[in-house]
Image (tube, rainbow, N blue to C red):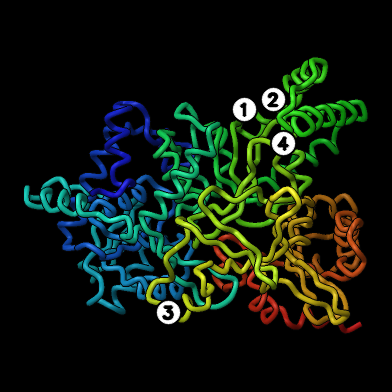
Amino acid sequence: MANKLVEIIPAQARRYGDREAYRFCWRKNGEWQSTSWKEFEAQINVAAKALAALGLIEKDTIAICSPNTPQILITELGAFANRIAAIPLYSSSSQEQYDFIVTNGEARVLFVGDSHQYPLAYNYWKKYPERITRIVVFKNDELELKPDDTITIFWDDFVRLGMNTPEEIAIEVKRRTEEGLPEDMATLIYTSGTTGEPKGVCITHSNYDACMEAHLKLLTQVNDTDLSMAFLPMSHILEKAWCFFCLTKGVPVAINYDPRIITETIHNVHPNIMCCVPRFWEKVYAGVKEKIAGMGKMQRMMVARALKVGKKRNLDYKRRGKKVPLLVEKEYQFWNKNIFQKLKHAIGIPNPNMFPTAGAPISDRIVEFMRSVGIDVLVGYGLSETTATVSFYPPIDYEIGTVGIPIPGLEVKIDTNGEILVKGPTVTPGYYKNPKANEDAFTDDGFFRTGDAGYFNANGALVLTERVKDLFKTSNGKYIAPQMLESRLAENKYIDEAAVIGDQRKFVTALIVPNFPQLRRWAEKKGIDTSDTEKFVKNPEVINFVMSQINEVQKDLASYEQIKRITLLPNHFSIMNGEVTNTMKVRRPIVAKRYAPEIEAMYSY
């Protein structure tokens, strides 16, 4: 019995043939190339045979460290045909992270994207030559292999290997495919974790099967005429599961290679569905707000009216499943044509369908704004350990401020300490070879401890409050949810990143990384010198201005929740130094240690 993920592409090749399965572009101004379902199936078959020819056997693992490319999907699906599991790593991983994950996951073949990731694999092989049989480089960006490198091949060599295998290899792959079991591990994904070492989350084929089944039932608005964009890293469980869902649904996927140029890519491709993290919408919202602020009084009044009508139509009526009154619908269509459509074109999504958004808290104001203009930001919640989704907005009666309702088949309950507990077919069987972590992660009756605090409201929607470990108490005994504050700050165009401080302190403070282009524009108008960044962030006038911006977004909070003092930082928080995770979540213990002098200074006067 073959696993379902292995059967999807052959089934779609029979169904769709020469229709587009995916498109890709290596370069910023290059041409997008389409690949059909039939070609995609052939590519996967070749990869499957090449993996077998490299001597890999059932239950082996491979590691893939690359920016988003079609080769990731081709390699993974080829691995699944062999009953081999894939370990995705972020392309920005440090050598220390890479070494830990590859060792812990026991990978035998290493796949890397280009010259930026090649040193990680090469250095690992030099340290542990007996563990690795091959390194495969996806993109030959004029990479010069090390003189003593006897193990690395390029993707074209890998493909040739698969194409020239003897018949017995093909027969062996076919046997492995047919003997695949639902409990086989498909993905070994390492949690970035805000504390401690990363843990390998085993995601089985049955986890993916249950995930696909639930989403096919729930996401009826998605169909095979849509176009998705793989923008988040494919090493992120949200993007990985979403890509598998798109393939299952027959939705073509445009694969974005460089996340730094997403604003250009999105205008070239015009996806109408795309997984996002809140940071994407925060930047869109800040840009729109700035544009509105620069308008004349009459234009601002028109936008305000348009938003009022959009809110009434989309949130008061459509959200409730009610018929929209004719006059409201007519006025909405007028504003949609004259304002909202222009906004959607400016973003690069002229015909939006829906945009799953998770990974961190998102401001209610941003969700309300996007929904009002006709961009359906679909807020959800999930973890690597739950094969992405635990809950998301239903089509009718979704509630802004919640993360929706749990998907069918999951049991979700709240522990006595407020922690969200989950049980069901999409939940990982456990962490890879880590009995201690498994003991800590599961209750006696088999519920997974998410580490997130939350509650169900009166209508059965799940509300997140904070990571259990992130909730802190001031010395006055008041509980503070730092992520809530940080997501509010992210709405402001002058703030790029924030880390809220206050555990066992008298009051709340924050380390702020400004949006330097915006803040410098403001400062230059005031005649403030911006040339020396270190001096610039210490300028009292600049600090007071940023504090005034913070006061604006926190004015409706209780006094004990409000940030009282700030320190502006000259640099962004670093993934390499471990200050933030690959998904840009603050690692609070490391930040507290790294910036201890700055933090103490905020409490010393």
Regarding mark 4 in the picture, which secondary structure is present there? helix
User: Which one is earlier in the sequence, the residue at label 4 or at label 1?
Assistant: 1
Cα separation, mark 3 vs mark 1, equals 49 Å
Cα separation, mark 2 vs mark 3, equals 53 Å
Disc number placed over residue 371 in the picture, else none:
4
User: Which one is earlier in the sequence, the residue at label 3 or at label 4?
Assistant: 4
Regarding mark 1 in the picture, which secondary structure is present there? loop
Q: Position of residue 491 (x, y in %)?
A: 77, 51
In this rendering, the label closer to the viewer, 2 or 3: 3
Cα separation, mark 4 vs mark 2, equals 13 Å
Q: Are marks 3 and 1 in contact (CB under 8 Å)?
A: no
Indicate left or right for 322 with 136 as reference.
Answer: right
The answer to whether residue 318 is visible is yes
Q: Are marks 2 and 1 in contact (CB under 8 Å)?
A: yes
Residue 127 lies, with reference to residue 405, above or below; the image says below
Residue ID for mark 1? 350
User: Which one is earlier in the sequence, the residue at label 3 or at label 1?
Assistant: 1
Cα separation, mark 4 vs mark 1, equals 15 Å
Which amino acid lies under the numbered mark 2 shown in the image of this protein? Gln
Which amino acid lies under the numbered mark 3 shown in the image of this protein? Pro
**Can you say which quadrant of the picture contains the C terminus?**
bottom right
